[in-house]
Amino acid sequence: MTDTTPKPLEVTQLEKAGCRVWQLTLQNIGRVDNDIDKLGVFAKGYWAAGDDGRLECIGLRIGERPGHVIAFYGDWIIRHPDGHFTIHPGPEVDQ
């Protein structure tokens, strides 16, 4: 974990403070997208060209421009009680 990556105790404290917390992975992106959509917030896959030039989903865009945030695989997504989102970088992950 990096210094900015929430540790299990910090995640528990964030949840106790009323935050929703997800760590975005290739396996759960659909569920996280759905959870955020259910909160009434626009979310969709974030796509970029890979090394071979083909488009690939590399994360999740949350919110509408301006003011949207982008979470990449491995990042922690935190929805605060006031409704805003912050992203904490996770460890580098292979896609």
Image (cartoon, rainbow, N blue to C red):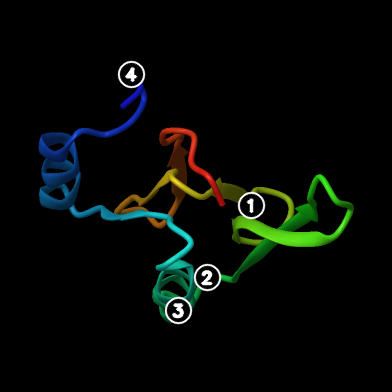
The mark that comes first in sequence, 1 or 4, is 4
Front of the two marks 1 and 4: 4
Label 3 or label 4, whichever comes before in sequence order? 4
Residue depth check, mark 4 versus mark 2: number of the one nearer the observer: 4
Q: Find residue 46 and report its horizontal and vertical position in percent.
A: 68, 59
For marks 3 and 2, the one nearer the N-term is 3
Q: Furthest-front residue in view?
A: 52
Q: Residues within 10 Å of mark 1 (few under 14, many from 20)?
A: some
Query: From mark 4 to mark 2, how far is it between C-alphas?
Result: 28 Å
Quote the CA–CA distance across marks 1 and 2: 10 Å
| Residue that carries the numbered disc 4 in the rendered image | 3
First-in-chain label (1 vs 3)? 3
Per the image, label 4 sits on a secondary structure element best described as loop
From the image, tell me which residue sits under label 3. Answer: 34
Q: Quadrant of the N terminus?
A: top left
In the foreground, 53 or 83: 53
Q: Amino acid at mark 4?
A: Asp
| Amino acid type assigned to the residue bearing label 1 in the image | His
Residue type highlighted by circle 2: Val
Picture residue at 25% right of the left edge, 53% below the top = 19
Residue drawn at 35 percent across, 22 percent down: 2
Mark 2 nearby-residue class (10 Å; few <14, some 14–19, many ≥20): some
Residue 43 in which image quadrant = bottom right
The answer to the question of whether label 4 and label 2 lie on touching residues, with beta carbons closer than 8 A, is no
Residue ranking furthest to the top: 3
Q: Nearer the viewer, mark 3 or mark 2?
A: 3
Q: Is residue 93 above or below residue 28?
A: above
Q: Is residue 22 left or right of residue 40?
A: left
The residue that mark 1 highlights is 68
Q: Is residue 46 above or below residue 35?
A: above
